[in-house]
Image (cartoon, rainbow, N blue to C red):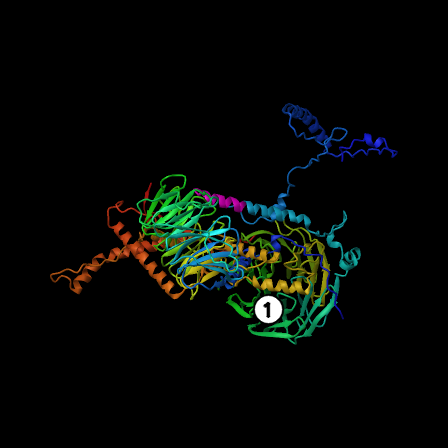
Amino acid sequence: QRRAIPFTLGVPRNYDPTLHPFEVPREYTRALNATKLERVFAKPFVASLDGHRDGISCITKHAKSLSTIISGACDGEVKVWNLPRQECLRTVQAHEGFVRGICSRFCGTSFFTVGDDKTIKQWNWEAPGYGVREEPINTILGKAVFTGIDHHQREGTFVTCGQTVDIWDEQRSSPIRSFSWGVDSFSCVRYNPVETELLASCASDRSVVLYDTRESAPLRKVIMQLRSNTLCWNPMEAYYFTCANEDYNLYTYDIRHLDVPVTVHMDHVSAVLDVDYSPTGREFVSASFDKTIRIFPKDKGHSREVYHTKRMQHVICVRWSADNKYVLSGSDEMNIRLWKANASEKLGLLSAREKAATHYNKKLIEKFQHHPQVRRIARHRHLPGDILKQKRELREMREAQRRKEQNVRKHSKPGSVPLLTEKEKHVVAVVE
Amino acid sequence: MAAVTPEVLTSTHVEKMKKKKLPKRYWEETEKTDQSQRRPEEEQGKAGQNQNKSTVKEKSLKRKNGESLEKKDPFPGEAPIPQKQLQKFQRGKKCKVPAGARERLKEAIAISEAMSEHAQKQAARYDLLLPEDAGFLEGDEDEDTNTISQADIADAVDITSGSKYFNLHLSQFGPYRLDYSRTGRNLLVGGKKGHVACIDWQTKDLKCEMNVMETVNDVKWLHTEAMFAVAQKRWLYIYDSKGVELHCVKKFNDVLRMQFLPYHFLLATASATGFLQYLDVSIGKEVAAICTKMGRLDVMAQNPHNAVIHLGHPNGTVSLWSPNQKESLVKMLCHRGAVRSLAVDKTGTYMVTSGLDRKLKVYDIRAFKPLHSCFLPAGASCLSLSQRGLLSAATGEIVQVYQNVLGSNPVSKPYMAHRLRGQIWGLAYCPFEDVLGIGHGEGFTSMIVPGAGEPNFDALDTNPYRSHKQRQEWEVKALLEKVQPELIGLDPGQLSKVDQASFEQRHKEQIEALGFDPLAKDKFKPRTKKKGRSSAGAIEKRKRKVAHEDQRVFLSLSLLSLFAIISHCSYYRHDDASHRRCNIFKQSD
C-alpha cells in the first residue's frame, strides 16, 4: 500500500517570538557548537614546498599572479614556484653566498635579487628557452653588501639598504640618492604601498628611520630598546607600519606620532624575524625565532592564531598571499610551508547554503565571544612543550619585574617614580 | 513612444481611437494643486535653461493636457507599520548610552540599535504575508455563543472541520488522560485501567493500541511521534509508536503526572512520594531528582516560556521548580483550599489556577501578582490554555471555554460550553487546530472551539505537514541545539544580560591596577632582637600586643563583604541558594 507523499507548498514561516521560545539559550548552544566545530575543522597546514638545499632567507610574491612566488636560499639559489601544483618551475643560481633580498617589479615581468656578493641582479620572470643559459637582464656591482631591496609601486626605481639606504633608477648603475644617518648598517627597507614616496628602514642602532624620496635627508627616526629586524607597512592605512623587534614583540607605529607605538603586540617567546600584512590591512602574520608563526589582528595586543609543526624550525620569513587566504613561511630547514590564513575555512567553491552557514557561525561566535565557556574554547591552542615552558617563564619574569617596580614606587616619595604604560616603556627617543 | 504626436494617426484610415478618460482618483485633487504650483517653477527653470544655453535639453514627457507622464508616488516614503505589530517583535529595552562613554562605544551602541530596529521592522512587515487568519464564533444579536451546540457547529462548517467533532466510546477502561503531539497530528489516549492507544486523529488512523495491564496515571509524547512515555502504577515505561516497550525506568516510581520540556529534551515527572524528577530523553539519564517535601504531587504544569515546572499543593500553594535547585524557586499562596488545576500561557506571563474553594484565579507570573479571580459554582478540576489564549475549564461533566481571560478584565460568561456523559479526567488543546480534546469516563471527545489554535505555524519549528525528510532534518537540528538544564531559570534571557561585576571582582581588579591590596594589612612580624631579648616567649608577647589590630582588620573586611551582599542582593542569580517567598494576600470577594 503506497502512501502518498504530502504536497508541501514551500516552507511557510511565522516569526512570532512566542512560537520560538528560548531564543537566547538556543543561540548560545549554537554558538558553543560553532566554536567547537571551528576547533575541530582547524587544519591550517596545506602543503610543504620542498627543494631548496639550504635555509630560506626571503620569499616574494609575484606582483600580478596569485599562483607564483619566488624564494631565495642561503646558498644563493633562487627558485620560482607554482603554488597550485606545488612544484618548482625554475631554479637560478643567483648569488654566491646568501640571497639577502628579492623583490618583484610592479609590472610583473622581472624581479631583482641582492646577495652577499655585493651585487644587484635583475632577472626575467619567464624561464629562458631550451638550451639558453640563465642570465640576469642586468647586474649592478656595489661597494658593500646589500641587505635588502624593495621596488617602487609605479615607477622604475628601487631602493636597497646595506651600509646606506640607496635609491636606484633601473637604467643607472649608481644610486640616484643615498641616505645615511650615522648608522652602521640597515637590515630592511620598505616602500609605503599607499604613499609611494615614503620609505622606512630598520637600522642597527635600534632605530626605525623614515624617509621621503622627495627630500634630501631622512625625515625622522624612533629609537627603541632593542633592534627591529623587519618592518611592514599597512597596505590599507598609509600611516601605520609594524616592525618586528628582537625583544619578542611587534610594534605598530603611526608615522605622525612616533613617540608612542599605537599597539604593542606581545605573544612570541623569542625574537621576531619577519612580519607581513594581509592585503585587507586588518591582520598581519609574524615569523619568529621560536619555531612558530603567529597571526595578529592589527589593533589587538595578542595573537588570534599560532601555527607550528615539529618539522618547522626557526622561521625566517613569512608572506601573506595576495588573495588573503594563505600564509607562506620559509624556515631554516629548507622548506616553504603553505598555511591557511583562516584555519577552519573550507577551501574551494562553497554552495550558497555553506556560505550562509559559515557566516552564521562566525557571527554567533562573535556575538557570544565574551561568555566564559565560548571564550575558553575559542582561545585554546596547542603549543609545543618548549614554547609553553618559555611562555610561563616569561610571564614569571614580567610579573616579578612589575612587583619590583610597585615596591620601588611604594617605598619612594609619591610621584618620584612615574607610572609608565606598556606602550611608553619601549621607545627610547624620537630624533628629527 | 508618447513623443509620437497624434497628428500622424489622423492621416490613416483607422478610426481615431477615443481617448479613454482616466477614472478620478482620490489623490488627484492634491496633484492638480501641486501642478499649479509647479508650473510657474517649471517656467522659471526653462527660462534659466534657455539663458544658460545648455546643449543637452531634457524634454520632460508631457501628455496632451499638460500632465507629466512621470509617475508620482501618491504615498511617498515607507509604509507605516502599526505599533501593536512592532511591539510584538520587541525584544528587550533600548540600550542606554552610559554617561562618559567613549566615542567608539557610542558608535557601537548606535549601530547595534539600528540593526535591532531594522530586524524588528522586517519581522513586523512579514506579518502581512502570513497565509491564515484565526477563526471565531459569533452569535446572532440575541444568541449567546455558549448555547450553540457542537452538532450545530459541525453542520455549519465544511466537512473536514465538521469531522473534527467526534466521540470515541471507550467506556470499559476507565477515565482517559490524553496528550497531543507537538505538531498536533497524533493523539495519545491512556485509560486508567490500562488502555493506551495512539491515533492520527484527523484520518482516524490507529497507530498502536494495547493494554498495559496496570493502572495508567499519565501519558505523554516525547519529542517526536516515535516515542511516548506512560506512567504506570509502579514505574515509568517508554514505548515506541508501534507499541513496543523500549524502556522501563525503575528509578522513576509512582509517577502521577508528567510534563515534557521540548527544547531541553527533559521529561519532568511528579510522583506520589513527593519527588520531582527530570529525565533527559536524548541521552537517557536522570538529570535531577528533587525531594520536594510537599506531599503527594498531583497537580503539575509547565511554563512554556522558561521551562519552569509549576506544582500545585493541597495547602493552596503553588511552587515553581527548576532542576538546578533543591528548593523551589518561588512559593505562592494561591487558594484557600487545595489547588485543583494549573495552566500557564505560552508567553509565560499569566497563570490560571483553580482551587477547591471554587475560585478561578489569574496571576501575573512575572510580577507574582494576582490579577483577578472569579467564582465558579463547581470548581474546575481541569484547566487548559490554548495557543490563542482561550481557557477551558472542566467541572464534572461540563466543559466551559472562556475568552479574554488573560488580561485585566474579569471574566463574565463563557464563550462556549459542552456537556458530556462521563467524568472529565483530561483536557488538552490541539496545537494548530481549533480543537479541544477531552478525556472522560466514557472515552474521548474532540470538541470544535473556533479561534483556539494558532493559524500560522512555522514550518521550520513544528510543521504539522512535514514529510519524513523534514522530520529527520528537524530532529537533528533540535538535538544539536538542545538547551542544557543548567540554563533553566525564571528568566530565560539571562545569558544575554551583562553580569554586573561582583564586589570581589572589582576588588581584584583594583588590586591588579594598583599593584597592591589597599585593604590588606601585612601580618606583624616582630624583629628578632639581639642581646638575649628574642627568646620565643618574648616574641609571642610582642605579637600579642599587636594581635587586636589584626582582629580589627578581619572585622572590617567581613563588614565590607556583608555590605557588598546587601547592596547586590537585588540582582537575581539563578544559582542562588536562597528562595523567595511571596505571600499573596487573601482577597475578599
Q: Is residue A159 above or below residue B272?
A: above
Q: Is residue A84 magenta?
A: no
Front position in the image: B148 or B238: B238
Q: Residue furthest bottom?
A: B213
Front position in the image: B468 or A41: A41
Mark 1 — on which chain does it sit?
A: B
Identify which amino acid the numbered label 1 is placed on: Leu
Q: Residue furthest front?
A: A131
Q: Which residue is mark 1?
A: B256
Write the start and end of the magenta stretch as one range: B96-113
**Residue B274 percent location from the top left of the image:** 54, 68
Front position in the image: A333 or B77: A333
Quarter occupied by residue A197: top left
B205 displayed left or right of B110: right
Residue A375 visible in the shown view: no
Quarter occupied by residue A174: top left
B184 displayed left or right of A384: right
**Residue B200 percent location from the top left of the image:** 71, 66
Q: Residue furthest left?
A: B531
